[in-house]
Image: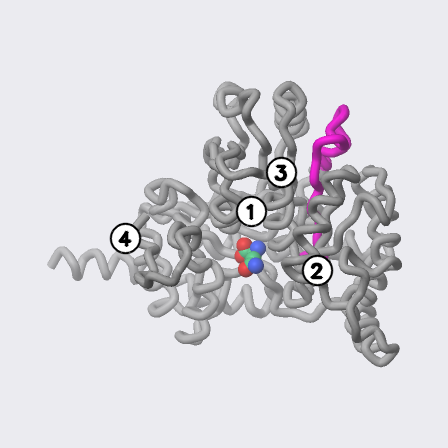
Amino acid sequence: MDTYRIDHPLVADRVQHFPESVIRDMSRVAAEHKAINLGQGFPDFDPPKEIMEAAKKAIDDGYNQYAVTWGAPQLRHAISSKLKAFNKIDTHPDQNIVVTCGATEAMMASLLATVDPGDEVVIFEPFYENFGPDAVVSGAKPVHVPLHEPEFQPDEELLKKAFHRGTKAVIVNTPGNPTGRVFTDPTLKLIADLCEENNALAVTDEIYEHMIYDGLHHTSIATLGDMHERTITICGFSKTYSVTGWRLAYTAAPKPITDAIKRVHDFLTVGAAHPLQIAAVAALELPSSYYDWLRDTYDKKRGILLSALEKAGFKCYRPNAAYYIMTDITDFGFEDDFAFAYWLTKEIGVTPVPGSSFFADKEKGKQMVRFAFPKKEETLNAAAERLAGTKEKAEARVKAEVA
Ligand code: GLN
């Protein structure tokens, strides 16, 4: 683990075991080389007008001081109604909901509130990069369960083996990043059964709940059996309403667990930006047609990027949810994912995220990179034009090396 070492006696040991985010670093690399950034997953288009107007109005209306630390009451009421209507989860706005600074804080606060140092937490691999440092900072001992391509569903026997009476929690991320897969209902049922048998908690990141294609549907694990008693459901505004910079998300959990999350959240951040919380109420009031539009436009973007990548010689693991495409780059003949991602940025002008950042065992992601498609069609088309030369340029590079 010495690769990440910051060599200074005043630095704490807990930060010596993970690097800064590779995903976020790639945005800096893309900017430096003026490449099209298909790395970090954020839209290059505006959020709905209604909610931008609502944010400006909230500032003019005087929502400029602290909100209630666990969320403005009107937002928690709106979230509670949304959880009932969409996720089929019953909550009380005062007892079960905490508004956080993004799903990033929601996950970290949830783990800090529930996991003691040394507790085992089951994490599917590949996983969203943050879950690694989340485990380190909370002191969790990660137990990784592989999701094998191309389906990226867990193997029943391996999953059963990962759980035992000492298991504290499992992190469930469906629809999943970076795989772009929804866990099937039997998979979720199996996870739920294992949580119940072993008295374990499920912490679920459902930030892509509205981006599901091919007629598939979203199931919140909290709705299965008695799972509402042992689930922290995390949903957010960033992806659904194209406001990743607003840093707004929330947890829904049983009252004692919510009380614990409230404490951590209170002392970590005091609270999320008040005027943006008021604007988020307007987001939750958008008509159901908004979600159909969202899914259909993302479905189209998926099609554009998939076809561009396949034409360019990438082996794609076709996603049916979220907004990422994992690819296999073995055929391009690069030593590893970082070398390829930097080369693609400089030579082709398109930036992906190196695949190893989604694995604890870096070897496993060494021949993978992830592309994100929350971009305007014109951006994706421009990326497609640039990507078209990938295979030839990569072959020329291999030939030059051999010569
Ligand atoms: N979830 C996004 C991604 O995976 C970005 C997350 C972030 O940088 N906070 O790219």
Give the structural element (helix, strand or loop) at label 3: loop
Task: Characterize the local packing of mark 1: few (<14), some (14-19) or many (20 or more) Cα atoms within 10 angstroms.
Answer: many
Of residues 318 and 111, the one drawn nearer to the viewer in this rendering: 111
Mark toward the start of the polypeptide (1 vs 3) = 1
Task: Characterize the local packing of mark 3: few (<14), some (14-19) or many (20 or more) Cα atoms within 10 angstroms.
Answer: many
Tell me the CA gap for discs 3 and 2.
Answer: 23 Å
Mark toward the start of the polypeptide (4 vs 1) = 1
Q: Residue 182 carries which label?
A: 3
Badge 1 residue CB within 8 Å of ligand 1: yes
Q: Give the label, 2 or 4, closer to the camera.
A: 2
Image quarter for ligand 1: bottom right
The answer to whether residue 2 is magenta is: no
Over which residues does the magenta segment extend? 219-239
- In the rendered view, tell whether residue 290 sits above or below residue 132: below
Q: Which residue is identified by label 4?
A: 334
Q: Give the label, 3 or 2, closer to the camera.
A: 2
Answer whether residue 302 is visible to the viewer in this image. yes
Tell me the CA gap for discs 3 and 4.
Answer: 30 Å
Task: Characterize the local packing of mark 2: few (<14), some (14-19) or many (20 or more) Cα atoms within 10 angstroms.
Answer: many
Give the structural element (helix, strand or loop) at label 1: loop
Give the structural element (helix, strand or loop) at label 4: loop
The answer to whether residue 221 is magenta is: yes
Tell me the CA gap for discs 1 and 3.
Answer: 10 Å
For the residues bearing labels 1 and 3, Cβ distance under 8 angstroms: no
Badge 4 residue CB within 8 Å of ligand 1: no
